[in-house]
Amino acid sequence: AQKQRVGVFGLTQPAVYSVDNEEQTGASLEFVVPRDLADGFVNNKRECYKFRFQKVFDQAVKQEEIFENIAKPVADSVLAGYNGTIFAYGQTGSGKTFTVTGGAERYSDRGIIPRTLSYLFERFSQDSSMVYNTHISYLEIYNEMGYDLLDSRHEASRLEDLPKVMIMEDPDQNIHLRNLSLQPSANEEEALNLLFLGDTNRMIAETPMNQASTRSHCVFTVHLCRREPGSATLRRSKLHLVDLAGSDRVSKTGLNGQLLTEAKYINLSLHYLEQVIIALSEKNRSHIPYRNSMLTSVLRDSLGGNCMTTMIATMAVDKRNLDESISTCRFAQRVALIKNEAILNEELDPALQIARLKREIQSLKEELAMLTGEQRDDQLTVEEIQKLEELVKTFLDDRDPDVTLSLGPDMRKIQYCFSLLRVMYLHALEDIFSSGCYASSLK
């Protein structure tokens, strides 16, 4: 098991602040708030607010640098068999969605999700010693209801048309998401197409603060399974990439009606998230209120369980948003107090184990029969010969390194198959010589 604190990174937009990234233990972000500005939203007796992060990035940072520093280490841990989570927290317009998903205008604007997908599939292709299987899910939480963004059976014009995802809990208190589909992705293109499908279905609204503000929480999850060829041992891991809705104060958004209801749901779920964070950071706390909201239930393993977790705090720290920025930093400091214990997710696949044991039993039976039984000396029938030829062809066509040619304890069949393989080999050599391939290879 690996014990670690939750990694916390700061991402800022233009404003009055100072950053020190040269400190040995990380970085610091400092705000100086004149007393005349502080009155009403922060302690007006304080003028200096200093917060610690692992690293702080400003508005000039490239998306590639964000990926290398924040997402790549988590992706590497997922490849090794650990669960991982990256979540972005901050007010509307501070750059959460751009950081997590990216911009559509330039290829260099790709965010953490598409870059992580590219990195994972690149690593798969480089590792021929393992067999990888990848599935993807995309969950949206809107007004405390979950929706499957990747349901292929629906052409939804509204979010409410998508399948509703329900939370189920088994006797061991493990969370299961009913109706959330797991879509297979064999390559990077298929995975990116699923991301595009999910983003198309996301709920978008306009607010005075942002023309394209997300009104919901979105959880994009990569489910990874890897094993060595011939082994029944599997390593399963999952990577949550979470884009939280904006943490805005209702009084500042200027909303009413349906948009006001949405903002209240968002803030309530973020309030419950903060309650869980505070509970996790307190020593000897027996009860953690995960069940208070769908968001905290879904992120249960990510926040205080078997997971390597990283938080990105995004801030638009100009003067009018200083209160939101300081609030985001305070939340980040509480997250940084959490210690998670990540465990390698290794298990035996029952189906593979059963198939392997069946092969062993059959092999042992055949060995025993050859040692103790009487061998037949009658000729093989036409039907038996035809079946043996089909078995040999299937055996040669199968690329699985674990495939076997099972003939039973019958020396007649074994000898015939050896003869058949010899004939096929000689014919293949003749074809090579006749086509001139052999001669050209010698030049």
Image (spheres, rainbow, N blue to C red):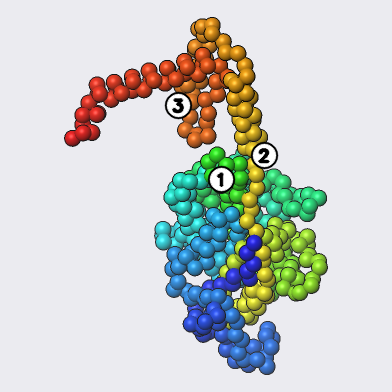
Amino acid carrying label 3: it is Leu
Whether pointer 3 and pointer 1 mark residues with C-beta atoms closer than 8 Å, the reply is no
Q: What is the CA distance from the residue labelled 3 to the residue labelled 1?
A: 23 Å
Give the SS element for disc 3: helix
Residue 412 position within the rendered picture, expressed as x and y whole percent measured from the top left:
51, 14
- Towards the viewer: 424 or 119: 424
Classify 304 as above or below 186: below
Q: Secondary structure at mark 1?
A: strand
Q: Residue at x 21, y 29 (%)?
A: 439
Above/below status of 249 relative to 431: below
Where on the picture, by quarter, is residue 92? bottom right
Q: Are marks 2 and 3 in contact (CB under 8 Å)?
A: no
- Identity of the amino acid at label 1? Arg
Name the residue that disc number 1 marks: 227
Residue occupying the point 62% across, 64% down:
2
Left or right of residue 274: residue 404: left
Which residue, given by chain and number where applicable, does mark 2 sit on?
Answer: 350
* Quadrant of image for the C terminus: top left
